Image: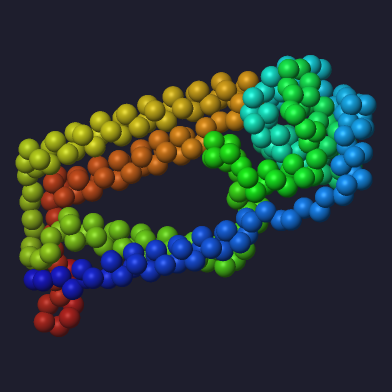
Amino acid sequence: MERNDAVMPWVAILFAAIFGIITLFLFNAATAPKPVEVDPAMVQSISTEWPELGPKVYEANCQGCHGASGEGGAGPKLAGNEAILKDPARVYNVVHKGQGAMPSFEGKLAENEIFAVANYVLHSWGNNIEEPLTPAVVAEGQGKVDPEVLKNRSRFVPEGIALPEIFLLTFTMLLLSYGLIGLYSNWAEGEELHPGIHRVQAGPLGMLAMVVTLASSLLFSVLFVRQMMTDYVAWKEGVMPDVFHEGLWAGLLLLSLAIAVGLYKKYFMDGEVVVEDASGEFPW
C-alpha cells in the first residue's frame, strides 16, 4: 500500500523555515540597539568626578561582595579581569541591569554614580582602559560587540518577548516537529505500507550505527559535564561561562539520543501496520 503522507512533511518544514525567517526579522527589530543621547557636559563631569566619587560608591555598594581590592568573594573577582577590559560597556550594563545573583542598581544609584563606579573598577587593581567609560562608549559597545564576548552574553535577547514572537516561535516549532516526525516515519516504515506484524532483525549496519550513536552520546555527555565543571571553576574566578559550548554539547547529546531511539525503532523493534477495513473502521 503506497503512502499518501510523503509530501506533507516537506511542506511543513518549508513553512517552518518561512516563519523562522520572519521571527528572526522580528527579533532583529526588537534587539536593535536604541540610540543613546550623549550629553557633552555629562561626559566631562564623568571624566573629572569618577576618581573621587567612584571609590565611595564602590565601598558603599560593591565592596561587600567583590572585596576591598576587587579580589572577589560572594561576587566575581574584578582585579585583573581581562573580560571587562575587552568589553568595558559590560561593567555599566551589569551594574545598571544586574546579572545572576547581582541585583540591578538602576534607580538606586544615579547615572553619574554608575559611571563613576564602573570607571573606578576599570582603572583599579591592574585594570586600565585608555579612555574613561562614557555614554558614548556604552552606545558604541551596544552596536559593535566582539563575537567572543557576544556568544557569552544574554543582552542580545529581548527582555520581554511579545505575543507575535511567541506565536511564531511556537508555530514554527510545531511545524518543524511535524515535518521531522513525518520524514522519520517515511524512513523508518518505508515508502509502502504492508498490513500485518513485521518482525525485524538488526543486521551488521544497524548494529554498527547503534554502537556509534551510543558511543557518541557517551562522548557528548562527558564533554558537557566537563564543560560545566570548567565553567563553574571559571565563574568563581569572575570569568563568564562558555555558554556556547555548553549548549553545543547539550544539543549534540540530545540529538544523538534521538537518533538512537530512531535506529532502535527501525532496526530493533517489531512493528505492526493496521489499515481501515471496507467500512472505514480500524480493526481493533
| Image point (30%, 45%), residue name | 258
- Residue 233 place in picture, x, y as percent: 56, 21
Q: Quadrant of the C terminus?
A: bottom left
Viewer-nearest residue: 1 or 84: 84
Q: Quadrant of the N terminus?
A: bottom left
- Residue 26 place in picture, x, y as percent: 56, 63
Question: Where 53 sits versus 36, above or below?
Answer: above
Q: Is residue 66 visible?
A: no
Q: Is residue 59 visible?
A: yes
- Residue 212 place in picture, x, y as percent: 21, 34
Disc count in the image? 0
| Lateral position of residue 174 relative to residue 204, left or right | right
**Residue at far bottom of view:** 279
| Lateral position of residue 31 relative to residue 113, left or right | left
| Image point (45%, 34%), residue name | 245
- Residue 140 place in picture, x, y as percent: 70, 45
| Image point (15%, 70%), residue name | 3
- The answer to which image quadrant residue 134 occupies is top right
Question: Where 81 sits versus 43, above or below?
Answer: above
